[in-house]
Image (cartoon, coloured by chain):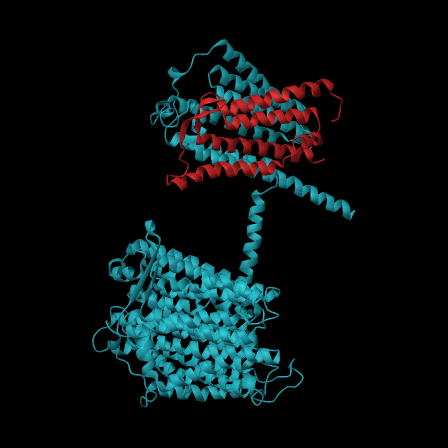
Amino acid sequence: MKANDVILQTATKVVFFIIFLFSIHIFFAGHFAPGGGFVGGLLTTAAIVLLLLAFDLKTVQEALPFNFMIVVAVGLLLALGMAAGSFIFNVPFFTHTFGDFYLPLFGLTSLHTAMIFDAGVYLVVVGSTITMIQSIGGDS
Amino acid sequence: MEFVWLIFLPILAAIIVPFLYKSVKNVHTGWFVLIVPVALFLYYIRFVKSVLNGEVHISELPWIPSYDISFTAYIDGLSILFSLLITGIGSLVVLYSIFYLDKKREKLNNFYVYLLMFMTAMLGIVQSDNVISLYLFWELTSISSFLLIGYWFTKDRSRFGALKSMMITVFGGLMMLGGFVLLSIMGDSYSIRELIANAPSFIDHNYFTLAIILILLGAFTKSAQFPFYIWLPDAMEAPTPVSAYLHSATMVKAGLYLVARFTPVFASSEVWIWLVTGIGLLTLFWGSFFAVKQTDLKAILAFSTVSQLGLIMSLFGASAVAYHVSGENAAIFKVAAFAGIFHLINHAMFKGSLFMVAGIVDHETGTRDIRKLGGLMSIMPISFTVAFIGSMSMAGLPPFGGFLSKELFLTSMLSLNQFDLFNFNTWGILFPVIAWIASVFTFVYSFYFVFKTFGGKRAHNAIPKEPKEAPIGMLLSPVILAITVVAIFFIPNMVAKAFVKPAVVAMQTGLYTNPSDVDIHVSAWHGWQPELQMTLGIIVVGLVLFATMSCWQKIYRVQPEKLSLNTLYNGMMTFSEKGMNRLSRLYMTGLLRSYLMYMFISIVAITIIALFMQDAFKVDFSSFAPVNAYGLMTAIILIISVIMVIVAKTRLAAIIALGGVGYSVALFFVIYKAPDLALTQLVIETVSVALFLLAFRYLPEVKRHGETKGIRVGNFLIAAAVGITVTLVALSAHSQKLIPSISQYYKDTVFTEAAGGNIVNVILVDYRGFDTLFEIAVLAIAAIGVYSMIKLRLSRKEKSDESE
């Protein structure tokens, strides 16, 4: 599928970042407003799929030179590690904790270990879907 | 020191064996391994003194305390005897193997790991007081036996024999597990000691006979009793040290151990006595009769092992009679247990030495075919002497240990006729008769084994190697065993006091309290008794038969190959393989449609049945949200999209219409205020349409015309059924609440407990975090699956391209 879609390609270059930033926002918003790791991950995937449609697989692979299988592994490790980390503090598996911290630039922020778990979810979702798309799309 | 740990010593030692093998190349690995059984033997022998005074030792290691399952080492007369046999013969076998297996050519690391694994398993069987851990060790012996028989795995016969032994013994093991479960239900305990104590309370239970049969299936398969013995001759493909150790001295005696151990529980049953004694005697005869047919040295010994195991089994069966008789007559029936244990010791000694000699002959001449052998007496004098002692003990001649136990065996068989319960006084006459005939054949094959190998003339061309006497290290173990065989004849009462009597007490709990109560004195000369007359008869008839063997050996050809048990086994194996194959082909059609059909039909059936059985179907319109214009419009779009999916002529149109379905569902979520779901649904729909389009070009064209009317109607019915079911479930679930909704709890706690505001997401990451964890794991597995399937296909394609 190699047509010269100038309009699509030009628009994509901007829209990609908008969707991507939105997905990051959605991801962080998750705990209090609609959103979360799963939707965030899917939105990021959607952004990458848009890239794939506008450009070809090779270009996208050069632009995002990750092995997405490793992204899956990192995500799983993060999620499982968070859940198992509670053992260190001698509390049951999967116990979350939270607190308010003063961060520079952000001000008073509520931080939550659930965020780490959600980041794992995000990474697994992005990694898995892109791995599938790349392997199916790359087989020619 | 908790000695229960010692059971695990061999298997722990096995961990370092491969490293020793790799790093210390100059020393035979066996020397290191030898330390383990020797150390254990020396440790266990310390128990003998206290055990013969009637003490027992218990050491416990909890395993699954909530199910009352533990590793309990229980040392009494029976388990100490077996433990000493396992470690003692184990030491000799390891010593022998050092010279038998070449350190350069053989994979010693594998061999010794398996052997040590077996040692742990066997010690576990004989010391476990908990039936569940006993079963575990039982299966571990089957597995290690499998690995050891298949040690030379490049040979077809080895693999065949390994599989055969595994199939039969594991089958028996599973049956036995069933028996244990029944027993533990009846006796309300997993502990053998407690089961024995509770036994009188459940002898009338419905499951009692069933439990007997199941447990005996385990014992009979393991101890190679008729008709399960067929695995033992094929197991002879194992290296000879293994045959000597597992398949004559220890593992095949596990079944005997089990029978002995459970005698106090089952002795009251007629079924038990008849089955154990009858099958044992039948096996004794069968094995000895067919041993004469064999031409392979190890096959002769295998059949003789089968037969001797049958002998001990029948004695153990007869020992249960003692529980039914009291008073003055009782003494005669108490001989059986004593004789059984005594013969078990003798058999381990002489059969171990005979196997080792067979291995030496094989090693030094390159053949085990008795038709090619002969005249080795002058070349291998020490081996001949050992073989002679072993065989004569087996034949039951003085001055060897076997004579004494054989006499006791005849005594107890003769006594059975005097037992006046369970029809024994009518049928009982058969026992001594069969025992006598079997003993004659035992005599014949013992002579056959030793004199056809070592006696006669040497056939120079037949033997592949120039024979010579084995190295001293290889002879050491069989010589030690042979010396023991002779020694037992001269000090039988010391052996009886130290080993046999404590074991008898453990086997017949309730009849004795202390080993010194066992009032049996063994003597070589006990007058002109029927036993002695029978022995003389055996010698005379045996000698005649041996001399005229070539004349009557033809009768073995009368039995057609088709009617043998091996044919039955092979037939069953082929039948089950083919049958199972056909069965799975029946439903594994390779058509995706069939699989989807199975799934959908079962979902519908299970849900509908559950719905009506529980009378759960109910619709309550009052709680439904009001329908508005947006909702109506969305519903119309949804229905139009669904119809488009069905009627679409091309896949592309169908995919886009399916996307429409998804988007309208997302709209519903928006209308009914579920922003999280709406968001997710929208993005999912977008990504999956893109994915569909990617995979689209690999799919074949839609071929609607290829479908018959029947298939289309079937599809329609299934689709409609699924739709209706889901609707019914949704309506019913909405209309009734069996339990109060959990939403209020979430509302109350989402901020205080989880410090969040969005319940949906907090459920995902916190309340039901486990679900999410597994979901992402599944997602990751799916990704890996897609990746590897496509990459695999690619690499295969590349290969076929190259070959073109």
Q: Quick check: can you spot residue B416?
A: no
Identify the chain drawn in cyan. Answer: B
Q: Name, please, the residue furthest toward the left.
A: B327
Residue B720 at x, y percent in the picture: 52, 26
Residue B221 at x, y percent in the picture: 44, 64
Judging depth in this view, the residue of B529 and B514 nearest the camera is: B514
The tally of labels here is 0
Judging depth in this view, the residue of B755 and B54 nearest the camera is: B755
Reply above or below: B51 against B113. below
Residue B780 at x, y percent in the picture: 55, 37
Reply above or below: A94 against B58. above
Which quarter of the rendering shows the N terminus of chain B? bottom left
Q: Name, please, the residue furthest toward the right.
A: B804
Identify the chain drawn in red. Answer: A
Reply above or below: B264 against B780. below
Judging depth in this view, the residue of B604 and B174 nearest the camera is: B174
Residue B18 at x, y percent in the picture: 54, 63
Q: Quick check: can you spot residue B666?
A: yes
**Looking at the image, which residue is at 21% across and 78% down?**
B328
| Quadrant hosting residue B707 | top right
Left or right side of A134 for B421: left
**Looking at the image, which residue is at 38% across and 32% down?**
B613
Q: Name, please, the residue furthest toward the front.
A: A104
Left or right side of B188 for B368: right
